Protein backbone atom coordinates (compact mmCIF):
# COMPACT_ATOMS: atom_id res chain seq x y z
CA UNK A 1 0.00 0.00 0.00
CA UNK A 2 2.78 2.40 0.96
CA UNK A 3 4.81 1.73 -2.19
CA UNK A 4 1.71 2.18 -4.32
CA UNK A 5 0.92 5.46 -2.57
CA UNK A 6 4.42 6.80 -3.09
CA UNK A 7 4.17 6.29 -6.85
CA UNK A 8 0.77 7.92 -7.09
CA UNK A 9 1.24 10.94 -4.89
CA UNK A 10 1.67 14.21 -6.74
CA UNK A 11 4.15 15.82 -4.35
CA UNK A 12 6.52 13.03 -3.56
CA UNK A 13 8.67 12.31 -6.56
CA UNK A 14 11.43 9.81 -5.67
CA UNK A 15 10.23 9.76 -2.09
CA UNK A 16 11.37 13.35 -1.55
CA UNK A 17 8.99 15.88 -0.08
CA UNK A 18 8.84 18.64 -2.66
CA UNK A 19 7.97 21.68 -0.59
CA UNK A 20 8.42 24.09 -3.50
CA UNK A 21 5.83 22.18 -5.47
CA UNK A 22 3.48 22.23 -2.49
CA UNK A 23 3.93 25.99 -2.12
CA UNK A 24 2.70 26.47 -5.67
CA UNK A 25 -0.65 25.05 -4.58
CA UNK A 26 -1.16 27.93 -2.11
CA UNK A 27 -1.61 31.17 -4.07
CA UNK A 28 -1.38 33.46 -1.04
CA UNK A 29 2.21 32.37 -0.44
CA UNK A 30 3.19 34.39 -3.51
CA UNK A 31 2.01 37.63 -1.85
CA UNK A 32 4.39 40.32 -0.75
CA UNK A 33 3.94 42.15 2.55
CA UNK A 34 5.48 45.59 3.13
CA UNK A 35 7.48 44.99 -0.03
CA UNK A 36 8.92 41.68 1.27
CA UNK A 37 7.96 38.10 0.41
CA UNK A 38 5.29 36.86 2.81
CA UNK A 39 6.66 34.47 5.42
CA UNK A 40 3.54 33.04 6.98
CA UNK A 41 4.27 31.53 10.38
CA UNK A 42 0.86 32.00 11.97
CA UNK A 43 -0.61 28.66 10.98
CA UNK A 44 -1.77 27.92 14.52
CA UNK A 45 -4.23 30.80 14.17
CA UNK A 46 -5.35 29.69 10.73
CA UNK A 47 -3.76 27.87 7.84
CA UNK A 48 -3.64 29.06 4.24
CA UNK A 49 -5.82 27.41 1.60
CA UNK A 50 -4.71 25.46 -1.46
CA UNK A 51 -6.17 26.43 -4.83
CA UNK A 52 -8.17 23.17 -4.81
CA UNK A 53 -10.13 24.36 -1.75
CA UNK A 54 -10.69 27.84 -3.17
CA UNK A 55 -11.89 26.25 -6.42
CA UNK A 56 -14.24 23.83 -4.66
CA UNK A 57 -15.94 26.68 -2.79
CA UNK A 58 -16.21 28.80 -5.90
CA UNK A 59 -17.47 25.83 -7.96
CA UNK A 60 -20.18 25.22 -5.39
CA UNK A 61 -21.40 28.82 -5.59
CA UNK A 62 -21.08 28.93 -9.37
CA UNK A 63 -22.83 25.73 -10.26
CA UNK A 64 -24.40 23.98 -7.27
CA UNK A 65 -25.61 26.62 -4.83
CA UNK A 66 -28.80 25.41 -3.23
CA UNK A 67 -30.09 24.45 0.19
CA UNK A 68 -29.51 20.84 1.22
CA UNK A 69 -31.67 18.00 2.59
CA UNK A 70 -34.75 19.93 1.53
CA UNK A 71 -35.18 20.27 -2.20
CA UNK A 72 -36.35 17.74 -4.75
CA UNK A 73 -34.75 19.72 -7.55
CA UNK A 74 -31.48 19.00 -9.28
CA UNK A 75 -29.30 21.63 -7.62
CA UNK A 76 -30.44 20.70 -4.15
CA UNK A 77 -29.68 17.06 -4.82
CA UNK A 78 -26.26 17.96 -6.17
CA UNK A 79 -25.45 20.18 -3.19
CA UNK A 80 -26.71 17.56 -0.73
CA UNK A 81 -24.57 14.89 -2.38
CA UNK A 82 -21.45 17.11 -2.26
CA UNK A 83 -22.03 18.02 1.38
CA UNK A 84 -22.68 14.44 2.47
CA UNK A 85 -19.72 13.31 0.43
CA UNK A 86 -17.57 15.71 2.45
CA UNK A 87 -18.90 14.15 5.65
CA UNK A 88 -17.78 10.73 4.42
CA UNK A 89 -14.33 12.10 3.57
CA UNK A 90 -14.05 13.45 7.11
CA UNK A 91 -15.17 10.11 8.53
CA UNK A 92 -12.42 8.33 6.63
CA UNK A 93 -9.89 11.03 7.49
CA UNK A 94 -10.24 10.49 11.24
CA UNK A 95 -11.37 6.86 10.91
CA UNK A 96 -14.71 7.20 12.66
CA UNK A 97 -16.90 4.11 12.51
CA UNK A 98 -19.86 5.78 10.89
CA UNK A 99 -20.96 9.03 9.25
CA UNK A 100 -23.53 9.36 12.02
CA UNK A 101 -20.62 10.19 14.29
CA UNK A 102 -19.52 13.21 12.26
CA UNK A 103 -21.36 16.38 13.26
CA UNK A 104 -20.71 19.53 11.27
CA UNK A 105 -20.26 22.54 13.55
CA UNK A 106 -18.75 26.02 13.20
CA UNK A 107 -15.42 24.96 14.67
CA UNK A 108 -13.71 23.52 17.71
CA UNK A 109 -15.29 26.14 19.97
CA UNK A 110 -18.82 25.20 18.99
CA UNK A 111 -18.04 21.49 19.22
CA UNK A 112 -16.91 21.80 22.83
CA UNK A 113 -19.85 24.04 23.75
CA UNK A 114 -22.17 21.45 22.20
CA UNK A 115 -20.79 18.68 24.39
CA UNK A 116 -20.79 20.88 27.50
CA UNK A 117 -24.40 21.94 27.05
CA UNK A 118 -25.87 18.73 25.69
CA UNK A 119 -23.86 15.95 27.35
CA UNK A 120 -22.80 17.99 30.37
CA UNK A 121 -26.19 19.37 31.34
CA UNK A 122 -27.81 15.97 30.89
CA UNK A 123 -25.35 13.58 32.49
CA UNK A 124 -23.45 15.68 35.05
CA UNK A 125 -24.81 17.02 38.32
CA UNK A 126 -23.88 19.04 41.37
CA UNK A 127 -20.64 17.90 42.98
CA UNK A 128 -19.35 16.12 39.86
CA UNK A 129 -15.87 16.96 38.59
CA UNK A 130 -14.65 17.82 35.10
CA UNK A 131 -10.91 17.41 34.52
CA UNK A 132 -9.01 19.64 32.10
CA UNK A 133 -5.30 20.48 31.85
CA UNK A 134 -3.35 23.65 32.57
CA UNK A 135 -2.53 24.07 28.88
CA UNK A 136 -6.04 24.39 27.51
CA UNK A 137 -7.22 27.02 25.05
CA UNK A 138 -10.02 29.21 26.44
CA UNK A 139 -12.42 27.20 24.25
CA UNK A 140 -11.74 24.19 26.43
CA UNK A 141 -12.00 26.11 29.70
CA UNK A 142 -14.87 28.58 29.51
CA UNK A 143 -17.61 26.18 28.26
CA UNK A 144 -16.87 23.99 31.29
CA UNK A 145 -16.90 26.97 33.65
CA UNK A 146 -20.29 27.95 32.26
CA UNK A 147 -21.51 24.38 32.76
CA UNK A 148 -20.13 24.27 36.31
CA UNK A 149 -21.99 27.52 37.07
CA UNK A 150 -25.21 26.03 35.72
CA UNK A 151 -25.17 22.69 37.53
CA UNK A 152 -22.81 23.15 40.48
CA UNK A 153 -20.04 20.90 39.14
CA UNK A 154 -16.33 21.56 39.78
CA UNK A 155 -13.41 22.05 37.40
CA UNK A 156 -10.14 20.28 38.28
CA UNK A 157 -6.89 21.24 36.56
CA UNK A 158 -4.05 18.84 35.69
CA UNK A 159 -0.77 20.71 36.27
CA UNK A 160 1.93 20.79 33.59
CA UNK A 161 5.68 20.64 34.20
CA UNK A 162 8.36 23.29 33.48
CA UNK A 163 8.79 22.01 29.94
CA UNK A 164 5.07 22.37 29.31
CA UNK A 165 4.43 18.64 29.34
CA UNK A 166 1.26 16.84 30.37
CA UNK A 167 2.08 14.83 33.49
CA UNK A 168 0.30 11.49 33.51
CA UNK A 169 0.94 10.91 37.24
CA UNK A 170 -0.66 14.24 38.16
CA UNK A 171 -3.56 13.35 35.91
CA UNK A 172 -4.00 9.95 37.53
CA UNK A 173 -3.97 11.59 40.96
CA UNK A 174 -6.79 13.95 40.01
CA UNK A 175 -9.20 11.29 38.83
CA UNK A 176 -11.59 10.02 41.49
CA UNK A 177 -15.13 8.74 41.87
CA UNK A 178 -16.47 12.28 41.35
CA UNK A 179 -14.77 12.65 37.94
CA UNK A 180 -17.46 12.51 35.27
CA UNK A 181 -15.65 13.94 32.25
CA UNK A 182 -12.11 14.58 31.02
CA UNK A 183 -11.60 17.26 28.37
CA UNK A 184 -8.04 17.87 27.23
CA UNK A 185 -6.14 19.19 24.28
CA UNK A 186 -4.31 16.85 21.90
CA UNK A 187 -1.69 19.48 21.02
CA UNK A 188 -1.24 22.76 22.94
CA UNK A 189 -1.64 25.87 20.79
CA UNK A 190 0.60 28.00 22.99
CA UNK A 191 3.37 25.46 23.66
CA UNK A 192 3.15 22.86 20.93
CA UNK A 193 3.23 20.00 23.46
CA UNK A 194 1.71 16.75 22.26
CA UNK A 195 -0.38 15.12 24.96
CA UNK A 196 -0.18 11.30 25.28
CA UNK A 197 -3.87 11.03 24.52
CA UNK A 198 -4.11 7.28 24.04
CA UNK A 199 -2.73 6.71 27.50
CA UNK A 200 -4.90 9.50 28.95
CA UNK A 201 -8.02 7.97 27.40
CA UNK A 202 -7.09 4.50 28.64
CA UNK A 203 -6.63 5.77 32.20
CA UNK A 204 -9.98 7.61 32.16
CA UNK A 205 -11.80 4.65 30.66
CA UNK A 206 -10.46 2.35 33.39
CA UNK A 207 -12.57 4.50 35.68
CA UNK A 208 -15.52 4.67 33.30
CA UNK A 209 -14.94 8.36 32.52
CA UNK A 210 -15.53 9.64 28.97
CA UNK A 211 -12.92 11.82 27.28
CA UNK A 212 -13.21 14.76 24.89
CA UNK A 213 -10.11 15.72 22.93
CA UNK A 214 -9.56 19.21 21.52
CA UNK A 215 -7.82 18.38 18.25
CA UNK A 216 -7.68 21.91 16.80
CA UNK A 217 -3.87 21.95 16.71
CA UNK A 218 -3.36 18.22 16.22
CA UNK A 219 -5.22 17.49 13.01
CA UNK A 220 -2.97 19.69 10.82
CA UNK A 221 0.16 17.86 12.03
CA UNK A 222 -0.68 14.34 13.20
CA UNK A 223 -2.52 11.45 11.64
CA UNK A 224 -5.57 11.16 13.88
CA UNK A 225 -7.44 7.88 14.23
CA UNK A 226 -10.27 8.32 16.70
CA UNK A 227 -10.86 4.57 17.04
CA UNK A 228 -7.22 3.91 17.79
CA UNK A 229 -7.11 6.74 20.33
CA UNK A 230 -10.39 5.50 21.76
CA UNK A 231 -11.71 8.95 22.71
CA UNK A 232 -15.42 9.57 23.12
CA UNK A 233 -15.46 13.02 21.50
CA UNK A 234 -12.96 14.72 19.20
CA UNK A 235 -13.24 18.36 18.07
CA UNK A 236 -11.42 20.24 15.32
CA UNK A 237 -11.73 23.29 13.06
CA UNK A 238 -11.66 23.23 9.26
CA UNK A 239 -9.71 26.45 8.92
CA UNK A 240 -6.64 25.11 10.72
CA UNK A 241 -6.43 22.13 8.41
CA UNK A 242 -6.32 24.03 5.09
CA UNK A 243 -10.11 24.27 4.84
CA UNK A 244 -12.37 27.29 5.16
CA UNK A 245 -13.40 29.20 8.29
CA UNK A 246 -16.84 28.70 9.81
CA UNK A 247 -16.85 24.92 9.59
CA UNK A 248 -15.53 22.27 11.92
CA UNK A 249 -16.23 18.81 13.22
CA UNK A 250 -17.44 17.17 16.36
CA UNK A 251 -16.80 13.44 16.34
CA UNK A 252 -18.73 11.57 19.00
CA UNK A 253 -19.31 7.88 19.63
CA UNK A 254 -22.75 7.08 18.27
CA UNK A 255 -24.04 5.61 21.52
CA UNK A 256 -23.19 8.82 23.39
CA UNK A 257 -24.56 11.14 20.71
CA UNK A 258 -27.72 9.04 20.60
CA UNK A 259 -28.27 9.49 24.30
CA UNK A 260 -27.68 13.25 24.18
CA UNK A 261 -30.45 15.81 23.62
CA UNK A 262 -30.15 18.31 20.73
CA UNK A 263 -27.94 21.34 21.28
CA UNK A 264 -30.10 23.73 19.23
CA UNK A 265 -33.61 23.48 17.83
CA UNK A 266 -34.72 24.41 14.33
CA UNK A 267 -35.04 23.13 10.81
CA UNK A 268 -33.40 19.87 9.68
CA UNK A 269 -32.90 18.49 13.20
CA UNK A 270 -36.48 17.19 13.42
CA UNK A 271 -38.44 14.33 11.88
CA UNK A 272 -41.90 15.52 12.99
CA UNK A 273 -43.12 18.71 14.64
CA UNK A 274 -46.51 19.35 16.21
CA UNK A 275 -47.33 21.97 18.82
CA UNK A 276 -47.60 19.19 21.36
CA UNK A 277 -44.40 17.32 20.65
CA UNK A 278 -41.38 17.23 18.35
CA UNK A 279 -39.56 14.10 17.23
CA UNK A 280 -35.91 14.64 16.54
CA UNK A 281 -34.05 13.57 13.46
CA UNK A 282 -31.54 10.71 13.46
CA UNK A 283 -27.79 11.24 13.86
CA UNK A 284 -25.96 13.29 12.77
CA UNK A 285 -28.79 15.68 11.79
CA UNK A 286 -30.17 15.86 15.33
CA UNK A 287 -27.25 18.18 16.09
CA UNK A 288 -27.35 20.21 12.88
CA UNK A 289 -30.19 22.71 13.28
CA UNK A 290 -30.70 25.24 10.50
CA UNK A 291 -29.04 25.72 7.13
CA UNK A 292 -25.41 24.73 7.64
CA UNK A 293 -22.25 26.16 6.13
CA UNK A 294 -22.67 24.15 2.94
CA UNK A 295 -19.80 25.73 1.02
CA UNK A 296 -17.63 25.34 4.12
CA UNK A 297 -18.34 21.63 4.42
CA UNK A 298 -17.58 21.09 0.75
CA UNK A 299 -14.41 23.16 1.08
CA UNK A 300 -13.31 21.08 4.05
CA UNK A 301 -13.90 17.95 1.97
CA UNK A 302 -11.62 19.41 -0.70
CA UNK A 303 -8.96 20.16 1.94
CA UNK A 304 -9.07 16.51 3.00
CA UNK A 305 -8.74 15.39 -0.63
CA UNK A 306 -5.69 17.63 -0.84
CA UNK A 307 -4.16 16.13 2.30
CA UNK A 308 -4.91 12.62 1.08
CA UNK A 309 -2.73 13.41 -1.92
CA UNK A 310 0.28 13.86 0.38
CA UNK A 311 2.44 11.29 2.05
CA UNK A 312 1.92 11.84 5.77
CA UNK A 313 5.25 10.28 6.69
CA UNK A 314 6.99 12.82 4.50
CA UNK A 315 4.88 15.69 5.81
CA UNK A 316 5.65 14.65 9.34
CA UNK A 317 9.41 14.37 8.66
CA UNK A 318 9.39 17.79 7.00
CA UNK A 319 7.55 19.40 9.91
CA UNK A 320 9.84 17.76 12.46
CA UNK A 321 12.82 19.09 10.55
CA UNK A 322 11.34 22.61 10.53
CA UNK A 323 10.65 22.53 14.25
CA UNK A 324 14.06 21.20 15.21
CA UNK A 325 15.85 23.62 12.85
CA UNK A 326 13.85 26.56 14.23
CA UNK A 327 14.43 25.42 17.82
CA UNK A 328 18.21 25.23 17.24
CA UNK A 329 18.34 28.58 15.47
CA UNK A 330 16.24 30.44 18.04
CA UNK A 331 18.02 28.82 20.98
CA UNK A 332 21.23 30.37 19.71
CA UNK A 333 19.81 33.90 19.96
CA UNK A 334 20.98 35.74 23.06
CA UNK A 335 18.33 36.53 25.69
CA UNK A 336 15.64 34.66 23.77
CA UNK A 337 13.75 32.15 25.90
CA UNK A 338 11.67 29.40 24.39
CA UNK A 339 8.44 28.70 26.30
CA UNK A 340 7.42 25.07 25.93
CA UNK A 341 10.18 22.50 25.66
CA UNK A 342 8.21 19.29 25.64
CA UNK A 343 10.02 16.28 24.19
CA UNK A 344 7.04 15.62 21.94
CA UNK A 345 6.01 18.78 20.14
CA UNK A 346 4.17 19.72 16.97
CA UNK A 347 4.24 22.84 14.87
CA UNK A 348 4.67 25.56 17.50
CA UNK A 349 7.58 27.63 18.80
CA UNK A 350 6.69 30.22 21.46
CA UNK A 351 9.36 32.58 22.70
CA UNK A 352 9.91 35.67 24.83
CA UNK A 353 12.51 38.31 25.58
CA UNK A 354 12.53 39.63 29.12
CA UNK A 355 13.16 43.19 27.91
CA UNK A 356 10.91 43.29 24.81
CA UNK A 357 7.15 42.84 24.73
CA UNK A 358 5.89 40.14 22.39
CA UNK A 359 3.73 42.67 20.55
CA UNK A 360 6.84 44.69 19.67
CA UNK A 361 8.51 41.52 18.43
CA UNK A 362 5.46 40.74 16.29
CA UNK A 363 5.23 44.28 14.90
CA UNK A 364 8.84 44.43 13.79
CA UNK A 365 8.69 40.95 12.30
CA UNK A 366 5.62 42.05 10.36
CA UNK A 367 7.63 44.88 8.81
CA UNK A 368 9.99 42.18 7.56
CA UNK A 369 7.07 40.29 6.00
CA UNK A 370 7.11 37.65 8.74
CA UNK A 371 3.68 36.85 10.22
CA UNK A 372 3.73 35.44 13.75
CA UNK A 373 1.16 35.69 16.50
CA UNK A 374 1.93 37.76 19.59
CA UNK A 375 -0.19 37.66 22.72
CA UNK A 376 -1.69 35.16 25.11
CA UNK A 377 -2.96 32.91 22.30
CA UNK A 378 -6.34 32.50 24.04
CA UNK A 379 -4.49 30.47 26.64
CA UNK A 380 -4.06 32.96 29.49
CA UNK A 381 -3.55 30.26 32.15
CA UNK A 382 -0.53 29.02 30.17
CA UNK A 383 0.96 32.53 30.30
CA UNK A 384 0.26 32.64 34.05
CA UNK A 385 1.90 29.23 34.49
CA UNK A 386 5.12 30.48 32.87
CA UNK A 387 4.94 33.96 34.44
CA UNK A 388 4.87 35.87 31.16
CA UNK A 389 2.24 38.33 29.89
CA UNK A 390 2.49 37.08 26.32
CA UNK A 391 4.72 35.22 23.90
CA UNK A 392 5.61 35.57 20.24
CA UNK A 393 4.59 32.37 18.50
CA UNK A 394 5.84 30.98 15.22
CA UNK A 395 3.61 28.13 14.11
CA UNK A 396 4.49 26.00 11.11
CA UNK A 397 2.63 24.23 8.35
CA UNK A 398 3.68 21.72 5.74
CA UNK A 399 4.42 24.49 3.20
CA UNK A 400 6.96 26.33 5.35
CA UNK A 401 10.68 26.13 4.61
CA UNK A 402 14.03 26.44 6.35
CA UNK A 403 14.58 29.66 4.37
CA UNK A 404 11.49 31.10 6.03
CA UNK A 405 12.91 30.23 9.42
CA UNK A 406 16.10 32.04 8.38
CA UNK A 407 13.90 35.07 7.60
CA UNK A 408 12.36 34.77 11.06
CA UNK A 409 15.81 34.67 12.66
CA UNK A 410 16.95 37.66 10.63
CA UNK A 411 13.81 39.52 11.70
CA UNK A 412 14.46 38.70 15.36
CA UNK A 413 17.98 40.12 15.03
CA UNK A 414 16.42 43.30 13.70
CA UNK A 415 14.11 43.37 16.76
CA UNK A 416 17.22 43.11 18.95
CA UNK A 417 18.94 45.93 17.09
CA UNK A 418 15.89 48.19 17.55
CA UNK A 419 15.32 47.37 21.23
CA UNK A 420 18.90 46.79 22.31
N1 LIG B 1 -6.51 28.67 18.38
C1 LIG B 1 -4.62 30.10 17.87
O1 LIG B 1 -4.09 31.07 17.35
P1 LIG B 1 -11.82 27.87 16.75
O2 LIG B 1 -11.64 29.33 17.04
O3 LIG B 1 -13.14 27.36 17.28
O4 LIG B 1 -11.57 27.51 15.34
O5 LIG B 1 -10.66 27.10 17.56
C2 LIG B 1 -10.52 27.33 18.92
C3 LIG B 1 -9.33 26.59 19.44
C4 LIG B 1 -9.54 25.53 20.30
N2 LIG B 1 -8.52 24.79 20.76
C5 LIG B 1 -7.26 25.03 20.40
C6 LIG B 1 -6.16 24.14 20.91
C7 LIG B 1 -6.98 26.10 19.54
O6 LIG B 1 -5.72 26.33 19.18
C8 LIG B 1 -8.04 26.90 19.07
C9 LIG B 1 -7.76 28.09 18.19
C10 LIG B 1 -6.05 29.77 17.53
O7 LIG B 1 -4.02 29.38 18.65
C11 LIG B 1 -6.93 30.98 17.57
S1 LIG B 1 -7.19 31.58 19.19
Image (spheres, rainbow, N blue to C red):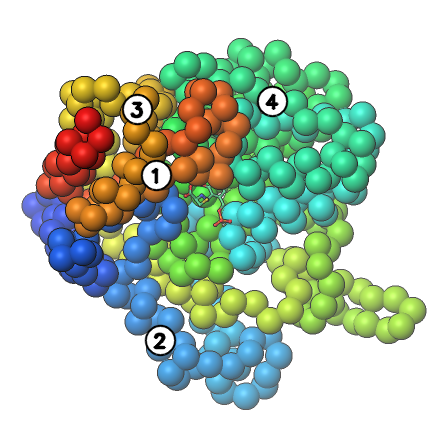
Decide: few, some or many residues near mark 4? Use Cα within 10 Å; few <14, some 14-19, many ≥20.
some
Alpha carbons under labels 2 and 3: distance apart: 47 Å
Sooner in the amino-acid sequence: mark 1 or mark 4:
4
Q: Alpha-carbon neighbours of circle 2 within 10 Å: few (<14), some, or many (≥20)?
A: some
Q: Position of residue 175 (x, y in %)?
A: 65, 18
Q: Are marks 1 and 4 in contact (CB under 8 Å)?
A: no
> According to the image, label 1 marks what residue?
359
- The residue indicated by pointer 2 is 58
User: Residue 295, which numbered label?
Assistant: none
**Residue with the mark numbered 3:** 355
337 sits left or right of 414 in the view: right
Whether tag 4 and tag 3 are in contact, CB under 8 A, the answer is: no
Q: CA distance from mark 2 to mark 1?
A: 36 Å
Q: Tags 1 and 3 in contact by the CB under 8 Å rule?
A: no
- The answer to whether 6 appears left or right of 164 in the picture is left
How far apart in space, not on screen, are marks 1 and 4 (Cα)? 29 Å
Q: At 18% from the left edge and 56% from the top edge, which residue is drawn?
A: 34
Q: Which residue is mark 4?
A: 157
Residue at coordinates 68% horizontally, 27% vertically from top-left? 155
Question: Which circle, 2 or 1, is nearer the viewer?
Answer: 1
Residue 230 or residue 287, whichever sits in front: 287
The CA distance from mark 4 to mark 3 is 31 Å
Which residue is at 14% across, 54% downward? Answer: 37
| Dot 2: element | helix
Amino acid sequence: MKAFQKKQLPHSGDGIFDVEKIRQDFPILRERVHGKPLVYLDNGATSQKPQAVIDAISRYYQSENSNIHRGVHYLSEQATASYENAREKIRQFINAKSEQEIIFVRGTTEAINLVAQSYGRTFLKEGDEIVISAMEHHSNIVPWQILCGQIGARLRIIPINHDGEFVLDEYRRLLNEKTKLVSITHVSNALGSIVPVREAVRIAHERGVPVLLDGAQAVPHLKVDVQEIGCDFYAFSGHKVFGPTGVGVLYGKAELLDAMPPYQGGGDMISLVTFEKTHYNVLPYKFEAGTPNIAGGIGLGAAIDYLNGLDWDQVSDHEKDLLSYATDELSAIERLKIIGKAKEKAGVLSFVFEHIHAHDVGTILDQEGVAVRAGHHCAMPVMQRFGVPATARASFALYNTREEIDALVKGIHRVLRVFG
